[in-house]
Structures are given as structure tokens and as C-alpha cells.
Amino acid sequence: MRIALIAPPFIPIPPPQYGGTELFIAQLAVGLKENGIDVVVYANGESTTPVELRWLYEKSDWPIRGEVSDNMKDSNHTAWAVRDAMDSCDLIHVNNASGLTFSRFSKLPFVYTLHHPLEPALSEFYRFFPEANFVCISNHQCQAQKLPGARVIHHGLDVSRYKLRKRKHDYLSFIGRIAPVKGTHLAIEVAKKSGIPLKIAGQVQPAFKDYFEAEIKPHIDGKFIEFIGEADLAAKNELLGNSLAMLFPIQWDEPFGFVMVEAMACGTPVLALPGGSVPEIVQDGISGHVCKNVEEMVRRASAMRDGDTIPPTIIREFVEKNFSVKAMVSAYIDLYTRLIPLKAKKTAVASGPSLSGPESAVA
């Protein structure tokens, strides 16, 4: 069995800093290889995942600007990757919407993982590809999309890369894109109302520079409200692991929310507002609290400061049990093995008897 994993060309695999989709692809690729699956990753040339790598564009290009040149780059990379994979792979797994369009030119099975939030235009687009095998990353996403035959596979995390910290420091943390839908301004409000310092990590993308300048930057004083910029794995371990709680005051339907699981892997509870996948990721009283509003987040944070918190070992065990890479990889291998013989049988029926039989498509 040989699997093609096609990533967008903008961020390396794995991502040095920001990149939820890229982290997913990196962990899936390594997990497949460890299970004896032949896998090739199509990404950019700066990628370092220890599997076979093929690239068209050598350098990273992030943040994207949403301009014509970026769309052309994405389409060019994906078209090249699909065409290349068609000659040597048994299945193509794409992770960007443009990748679906190239399924029209291939007889190989296509798997598409939905990394995007619910958008009417995307939902309409997906319905043009009924033969694609859609994978949702949360039950909420799957129910909202209503795609026939879609299945749910939650993202998994390599917990061994995150250090469990049992002793917490007196501050709250926020990590993510600095954008209104992520609620960075609400995290600041929680910090000020609770009197607990806040450390913010994340990227200020060009599209949200005005938001940062108007609603975030005026509150940054380097003491009570700190902004540390983008965080790599080491910085995440430090920032998330030492904090009383990670704030996740989202203002949209979150598709999954990788950073919630990263915080939990460090033994840090998550205080989140409901939306999208949050109730699936945060189990109330076990891995954090799903709060109705900012006021409840303030009460929960204050209570944690006073000692009413969740033992870090309990939080870590929750991640190991529910969001492991092993479980995620196993689910994808099961999907791949079901699709490859199925496609081979369809091809055999269409072309007539074959001396090699339908199993010849399985490496």
C-alpha cells in the first residue's frame, strides 16, 4: 500500500510554529510509516518529516495574502502532486479544497480531510464530488456539512513531545491566530476582570493587523498582558505547561482546535466558550470547562487561582485516552485499506477478467 499525502505548499511539514493542518499531516505520515505503510508527502522543500518527500516549491510562503498568486501557487503544486502520485500510489489523500478538483482526472481513491470551518461556498463545492471520501475532524463539523458517507476521525497528538507540568504559575495563556474569531480581545477581558496576568502567543496575519493594532496592542504592557509572538514547540511547552489555564474564547464554530489538546497534553486545563468542536474536546471537570460567557470564564479562572483546579495528571490521561496519534493513524489505515481493494474491484469489473485479480492494487 502506497499513500500520497498532499499538503498545501506554504508551510513546512512539520510546521516550525503555526500550522494545525501541517502538524496533522506530519503526525499522520510518521504514524503510517511506523505501521509499515509506504507514504510520500508532497509539501515544500523546507519540510523535514522523516518520510519520502517530494516538492515543487522549495521555500515556504506564509502568511498567504489571499491574492491570485497564492491561489495559483496552491493549484499548481496540487495539480503537479496529484499527477505525480497517480503513477506510483494506490490512494491520494488531499488536505486542501482545490485538491478535490483533480479527482476528476484520476481513477485512484481520493480522501479529503476537512480542515476548514463551515462555509456555505465550500459546502456547495463539496457536493460536486460525491465519489470523494470525506473525513470530518469533529462530529459537529460532520453534522453541519451533511456529506453522504462522511466519517469522523478526530485529530491525534504525539503526547510524548509535550512535557507534563504539575506545578502551575500565576498566569493565564492564550495561543492562536490573533483574530476576532479566536477571541484574543476576550482573553484580555478575562485576565483584567480576574486580576490574573495573561501571556499571548500567536501570529498577526496581514488581514488582522488593524484588529491587533486597535484591540490588542493598546493593552500590552509587557507585565500584566504580555505578547510573545509566534511559539514553536519548546515555547508552547513552556507557555502552556506553566499556566493556570489556557483561554479559548472562540467566536466561531471551531472545526477542531489543536491547541486545546496541546494544552491538555501539558496538564493544563482549558477554559473555552462553546462553539463547534469545543464540547467534544473539553470534557467539563476532566480536561477543563466549557463556559457560557466571559463572566463564567472569569469565575473559573479565579477559582483555579484559589486552588480549585483539575489535577494535571487527570488532564494528561484524558488526552492519551481520547486524542492519541495511535488511534488517529489506526482509523486512517482502516479507511485506506477499505478503499483500495474496493477501487480495484470496480476497475476489474469495468475492464473485464484480470489474471492478477483485484488484490493486485494493494502493495
Image (cartoon, rainbow, N blue to C red):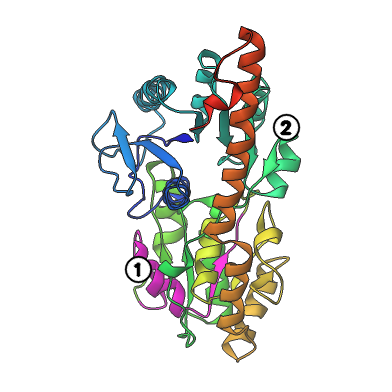
Residue 8 lies, in percent from the top left, at: 41, 35
Quadrant of the rendered image containing residue 182? bottom right
Q: Is residue 279 left or right of residue 169?
A: right
Residue identified by numbered label 1: 235
Q: Check disc 2 and report its element: helix, strand or loop.
A: loop
The verdict on residue 225 being magenta is yes
Given residues 53 and 206, the one toward you in this image is: 53
Q: Is residue 235 visible?
A: yes
Q: Is residue 233 left or right of residue 60?
A: right
Categorize mark 2 by other alpha carbons within 10 Å: few (<14), some (14-19), many (20+).
some
Callout 2 amino acid: Leu
Given residues 107 and 56, the one toward you in this image is: 107
Residue 202 lies, in percent from the top left, at: 40, 58
Quadrant of the rendered image containing residue 189? bottom right
Q: Mark number for residue 147?
A: 2
Q: Check disc 1 and report its element: helix, strand or loop.
A: helix
The residue depicted at 67 percent of the width and 13 percent of the height is 349
